[in-house]
Amino acid sequence: MKYLHLLRHSKSDWENTNLEDVERPLSKRGKKNARELGKYIRDSEIVADTALVSPSIRTKETLEIIREYSSISKNILFIDEIYGADHSELLKLIRELPSDIQKVLLIGHNPGLEILGDYFLFGDKENSSFAKFPTSALLSLVIESEDWKDWGRSPARLIRFWIP
């Protein structure tokens, strides 16, 4: 079985208009929600063999805060292609994972993350069935396969959809 945790970064700060999008840090509310998320991950005993993380400041800060509360993953990979990726680019990244990895955390951005989750659950590549996939949302999925190439080809089962 392969487990995939899709996590949208926590709420970012929009006050400094001189910053590029990739440079925006977390807002006060974002930091609070990331702490709640870290506690939830700890209490739910969620772990990942590998964390694939967008290089944006807000995704890095979300991960840092989560790691203050839990040891979600020791193997952290910052992957430039996650920033701005659509669902098909994220799917390609997942399908290229080595089969010895069992559990993955992917920290990224909407709309790609939301549409990817929807595709895994409902097969829809164009529209989202989620009423909301807000910042700090965590979607955990599993498929009955030993190969990451099967994601999107075999039905995924929902484990949790958590929102702070």
Image (cartoon, grey):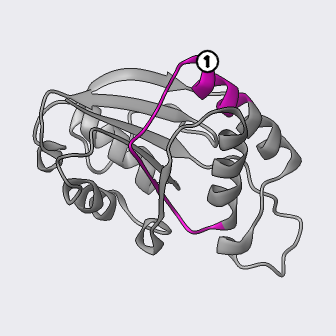
Query: What's the residue at 41%, 66% (across, down)?
Result: 85
Nearer to the camera, 140 or 134: 140
Residue at the spot x=78%, y=55% of the render? Answer: 26
Picture coordinates of residue 126, whole percent (x, y): 30, 51
Q: Is residue 123 magenta?
A: no
Q: Picture coordinates of residue 102 (x, y %)? A: 27, 38
Residue 61 in picture, x, y percent from top left: 71, 55
Determine the secondary structure under disc 1.
helix
Query: Disc 1 residue type?
Result: Asp
Residue 130 appears in the picture as rendered = no
Q: Residues within 10 Å of mark 1 (few under 14, many from 20)?
A: few
Does residue 42 belong to the magenta stretch? yes
Residue 35 position (above or below residue 49): above
> According to the image, label 1 marks what residue?
43
Q: Is residue 95 above or below residue 121?
A: below
Q: What is the magenta range?
A: 36-56
Q: Residue furthest front?
A: 74
- Residue 113 visible in the picture: yes
The count of marks equals 1
Q: Position of residue 161 (x, y in %)?
A: 48, 25
Along the horizontal axis of the image, is 1 left or right of 3?
left
Which one is in front, 46 or 109? 46
Residue at x-position 33% and y-position 23%: 158
